[in-house]
Image (cartoon, helix red, strand yellow):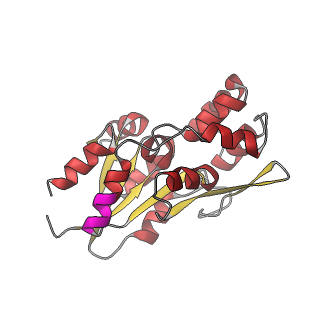
Amino acid sequence: MSGTRYVMVADFDGTAAAVDVQQVILDALADREGWRRINAAWAVGEMTTAQRARAQWALIKGGEREVAAVLEPLRLDSGFAAFAGLCEARGFPLYIVSDGFDFYIEPLLQRAGLGHLPTIANSLRYEHDVPRMEFLLQRSPDQYYGNDKTFVIEQVREPDSIVVFIGDGYSDRAAAHAADLIFAKDRLAEYCREQDLQFEPFNTFEDISAYFARR
């Protein structure tokens, strides 16, 4: 197995990041009951990611400066930087693939010295303190996910490689079916059990690094 070519695809919120960053922003700046009600509707398929995001961010009280202040103390998973280093040393491509937004992913990666990692996510930019969102990585404009991770996996897959997907939540469900090896926790682990999908459980990226250090 030492010569195996792995392609690493990692979710961000609650996975590469120690917390779900978007939920932290909403908890800090939006009506908690309101945004959670919207999230519940999305989780059961009543709203698309794009509809959910626009409805939730409309509840945020404050502009770009206030959101940036919430981001300041947030950090990545304690073992993620070492995992990224292992991937670099072994020649394994590592992609951040998120149904969240580049607006908060990029600064957290940069603060950790990992701004060079390719990030494939939905786009959010402020214009006159109004968030403008784009959902470009879809098979169709009305698709459930804003960023279709199965579509991304198809694009990053290399010949004779094993695609490893690492995730934790609802937006990772389809990607789990498209990957060759799954590392899952929280809701994604529950889903894998329900669907009888074989997976490797993990708590932090230290667990994942230890798995590949043995191979």
Looking at the picture, does residue 177 appear above or below residue 37?
Answer: below
Q: Quadrant of the C terminus?
A: bottom left
Q: Is residue 82 magenta?
A: no
Q: Position of residue 131 (x, y in %)?
A: 77, 50
Residue 56's quadrant in the figure? top right
Residue 6 position within the rendered picture, expressed as x and y whole percent measured from the top left: 28, 65
Q: Which residues are magenta?
A: 85-90
Q: Quadrant of residue 63?
A: top right
**How many numbered discs?**
0
Give the camera-side residue of 158 and 145.
158
Q: Position of residue 96 (x, y in %)?
A: 47, 57
Q: Position of residue 17 (x, y in %)?
A: 47, 44
Q: Residue at coordinates 53% horizontally, 39% vertically from top-left?
A: 74
Q: Is residue 105 left or right of residue 68?
A: left
Residue 147, compared with residue 210, is above or below; it is below
The residue most toward the right is 128
* Picture residue at 35% right of the left edge, 74% below the top: 158
Instruction: Determine the main secondary structure of the stretch shown in magenta.
Output: helix
Residue placed at 35% from the left, 57% from the top? 84
In this view, 111 is above or below 24? below
**Residue 86 on the magenta span:** yes
Horizontal side of residue 158 vs 141, given as left or right? left
- Asked whether residue 164 is in view, the answer is no
Tell me: 137 left or right of 195: right
Tell me if I can see residue 74 in this picture: yes
Q: Nearer the viewer, residue 153 or 98?
A: 98
Q: Quadrant of residue 69?
A: top right
Residue furthest out toward the top: 33
Image quadrant in which the N terminus is located: bottom left
